[in-house]
Image (cartoon, rainbow, N blue to C red):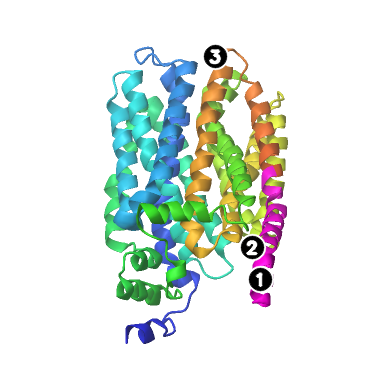
Amino acid sequence: MNSSHSSAAPRSPHTFRTVFPVLALCWLAVFFDGMDVNIYGAVMPHMLDDSGLGLTPATAGTIGSWTTFGMLIGALTAGNLTDWLGRRLMLVASVTLFSLGSAICAVAPSVGLFGAGRFVAGLGLGGLMPLCLAMVMEFAPPRRAALTTGLLMTSYHFGGMAATGLGLTLAPAAGWRWVFWAGVLPALVAVPLLLKLLPESPGVLLAHGERDKADAVADRYGLPRPTEVAAPAAGAAGRLAAIRALFRPESRWATPLLWLASFSGLLLVYGVSTWLPQMMRASGYGLNSSISFLMVINAGGIVGLLIAGRAADRFGAVRVSAIWFVLTAAGALLLKSQLPLGVTYAVVAVTGVFLFSAQVMVYAATNTVYRDSERAAGLGWVTGIGRTGAVVGPWLIGVLATTGNQSWGFTTFALAGLVGAVAIALVPLARRIGRSDASAALAPVAATAGLS
């Protein structure tokens, strides 16, 4: 009875309209993620001017790395906790955690406690992104995974623009602490909506043994009903098996390349999000102009994601990501030059078009490398290992700022773009080599079976 029921056709069409609630709720969660990540960069110039806090460029870079170190831990542990709690409750926990971190920052009397607050926020931020990406990819209509991923990630940049707006308006009027109080809003707005409206992943429900619930969710949103092979294995043994699966012959060479591309991309994303206003201020631009560059680059990011999503669905995420990384490197080198203010705004905007979506297309490329049952683990590790780049970026630019070599930060960003381009461009070759290795390994087995 149950097996025949599970083979029935879905009752709803699988379109953007049927999965819109999932996309909208994940969009809201990632909006607040982007706001929280960019808040620090938007208020850093005001914090450096606050003599009572005692923040220096060196400690500012270190704190930026504490945030991303928290993200690294959050991204790598979220998968294990998802086995027990499910993706929906883990999303709620992630949003609650980074809201708590923002509250700690708002009341912190010292640099040490402020850094602890950013670390706590990082734990929540690190878990949220791979969970939302996995949810959206699972619910996305066929052949629209890259476009859906791009639409989701526009929310990160709208959040970044909101953070910049708060840095430009609220920080000068009421002080930088009130900007972090605004970072508590996610717990009040997003958490109730996620608890009430977001469905659980059918694949996770099936892995928990809840076949009827999994089928009901799949039917409601027009998804194919999950099969055992599409369900992520539960428990510690399942997680180890998922990690080993990332290095099966077909993907063992592509996996480290995806990790390297993600490292480069996240070094760029978090290095720029943390330091762009202060780097531009050190280059001679005014305080308001320097902070507004962060809004402009995020606006460019929104346009870039909409372009990249459609381009990737047509030409492939790998090709688009590689080209976007190269163009990001060119933009970073241009920003090193002393350009007129209007030209600088244009270069920042165009660089934003390519910078952020280059990294997002790395995530979309995982869809071509990993099977359904490996998708969550693959994304978790691509984002998790990539977070080491997010740790290195803010710290490295902080070191350069301390020694008075902030302009070298733009060279660092250009080099990261070139490394990312080479890594992602080699993924198709790595997959072909992997398939050849797999075929070579199977050939003797087939020959033996034929003889017997």
The answer to whether any part of residue 251 appears in the image is yes
Q: Which of the two residues, 172 or 123, is positioned nearer the viewer here?
A: 123
Mark closer to the chain start, 2 or 1: 2
Tag 3 near tag 2, CB within 8 Å: no
Q: Tell me which numbered mark, 3 or 1, is placed earlier along the sequence.
A: 3
Q: Residue at x 29, y 37 (%)?
A: 100
- Label count reads 3
Q: Image quadrant for the C terminus?
A: bottom right
Q: Are marks 3 and 1 in contact (CB under 8 Å)?
A: no
Q: Which residue is mark 3?
A: 402
The residue nearer to you, when weighing 211 against 273, is 211
Few, some or many residues within 10 Å of mark 3 (<14, 14–19, 20+): some
Q: Nearer the viewer, residue 165 or 444?
A: 444
- Assess whether residue 449 is covered by the magenta stretch: yes
Residue type at mark 2? Asp
Judging from the image, what secondary structure is the residue with disc 1 in?
helix
- Residue drawn where x is 61% and y is 41% of the image: 260
Alpha carbon distance from label 2 to label 1: 42 Å
Q: Residues within 10 Å of mark 2 (few under 14, many from 20)?
A: some
Q: Quadrant of residue 228?
A: bottom left
Observer-side mark, 2 or 1, equals 1
User: What secondary structure is the magenta-colored segment mainly?
Assistant: helix
The span shown in magenta is: 423-452
Residue 150 marker: none
Membership of 119 in magenta stretch: no
Q: Is residue 14 left or right of residue 427?
A: left
User: Which residue carries the number 1 mark?
Assistant: 448
CA gap, disc 3 and disc 2: 43 Å
Does residue 239 sit above or below 350 in this rendering?
A: below
Which of the 4 image quadrants contains residue 59? Answer: top left
Quadrant (top left/top right/bottom left/bottom right) for the N terminus: bottom left
Residue highlighted by disc 2? 313
